[in-house]
Image (spheres, rainbow, N blue to C red):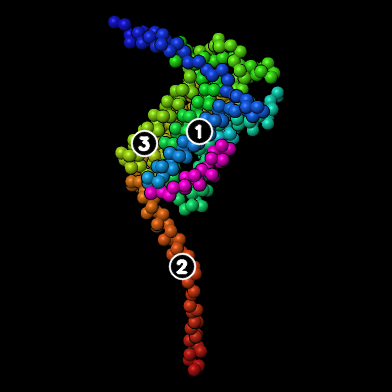
Amino acid sequence: MREPTATVVPVLNAVLATIPSPDRGVWNLGPLPIRAYALCIILGIIIAISWGERRWVARGGVKGEVTDIAVFAVPFGLVGGRLYHVITDHDKYFGPGKNPLDALAIWNGGLGIWGAIALGAVGAWIGCRRKGIPLPAMADALAPGIVVAQAVGRLGNYFNQELYGGDTTLPWGLEIYHRVNPATGLPDQLGGVAVDHTPMAVVHPTFLYELLWNLGVAALVVWADRRFRLGHGRAFALYVAGYCAGRFWIELMRTDEATLIAGVRVNVFVSALVFIGGVVYFILARSKGEREDIAALRAATEEKTENDEEAEEEPQEPVEAEEPESAKKTE
């Protein structure tokens, strides 16, 4: 009996052949370069904010509050993502023959999700504190939108010919082209134009694997949130754990340049550690009960604030000091 893969793969090869890469990742509108990577990041942010807004309102929040929080979270997240990338891939920017200013060229790609989430959470905490909103509740509302935004961002890696694995003969293999900068004639994978469409290699499209995994994680979070009424940051923890589980095995497949620790890509270790943290938080936060009512929390917070202000403003009656016993005896 023939193995199923012996039949399926040739059929898929006949239908799909391979996945072609875009012939460029940048289009020049006069002097203004339009970069696919930047457009994908912007689109992902819009999706995360708009979907998070709807989820927040459905939980009792006020419309517009997610946008207010995003004013702090998005810039912090972009800076954090870039810092993580530059720190973990410092050899690309510092050392002999490198230009340190390239570390600022975020439009060429290079955002570490770990740094983006970590510093973005700091920005969200600042925004939530100013609005009197519990950060875990806001994180739960944003969780599925964030992971979908990551999926959209991976399309930017597709245009940049980044995040790929080893050679493959599978029908969904990704063609990598030789690109050249038209102005200089030098190789330029990020902003150049394909010289021809004869692939230099056909590789595993790990960007696509992660994109599909992220969409699956978003569906899992939405289902679990509805089924179990996750609250107190548990929906966000489920997203973190689910994403890290996929990133772990996808990272092991990648062959693009990366910082290694004991011969293993640094993000493999980070994925494992953050996965454990997400699972531990998900379990421990279960003791806090079901999802909090945002409207009730807001009312309780406002009432407490009013009571504290009234207590501070209420005048205190002076307390008369009692006469010492010696004075009473003298009288």
Residue 317 vertical position relative to residue 302 in the rendered view, above or below: below
Q: Quadrant of residue 115?
A: top right
Q: Nearer the viewer, residue 223 or 37?
A: 37
In the image, which is nearer the foreground, mark 3 or mark 1?
1
Which quadrant, please, contains the N terminus? Answer: top left
Apparent side of residue 150 relative to residue 80 in the rendered image (left or right)? left
Query: Type of residue at label 3?
Result: Val
Q: Which residue occupies the extreme top position in the image?
A: 1
Report, in whole angstroms, how far the alpha carbon at label 1 lies from the one at label 2: 46 Å
Measured from the top left, where is residue 40 in percent x and y? 52, 30
Q: Residues within 10 Å of mark 1 (few under 14, many from 20)?
A: few
In the shown orientation, is residue 315 left or right of residue 35?
left
Residue 154 screen position, x and y as percent: 50, 27
Element at label 1: helix
Local secondary structure at mark 3: helix
Mark closer to the observer (1, 2): 1
Residue at point 47%, 45% (across, down): 66
Q: Are marks 1 and 2 in contact (CB under 8 Å)?
A: no
Q: Please tell me the numbered disc located at residue 222.
A: 3
**Comes first in the chain, label 1 or label 2:** 1
Q: Residues within 10 Å of mark 3 (few under 14, many from 20)?
A: some
* Chain part drawn in magenta: 60-80
**Of helix, strand and loop, which one carries label 2?**
helix
For badge 2, the amino acid type reads Glu
At 64% across and 16% down in the image, what residue appears? 180
Q: Are marks 2 and 3 in contact (CB under 8 Å)?
A: no
Q: CA distance from mark 3 to mark 1?
A: 21 Å
Task: Name the residue that disc number 1 marks.
Answer: 43
Left or right, 230 with respect to 70, comes to left
Q: Which residue is mark 2?
A: 310
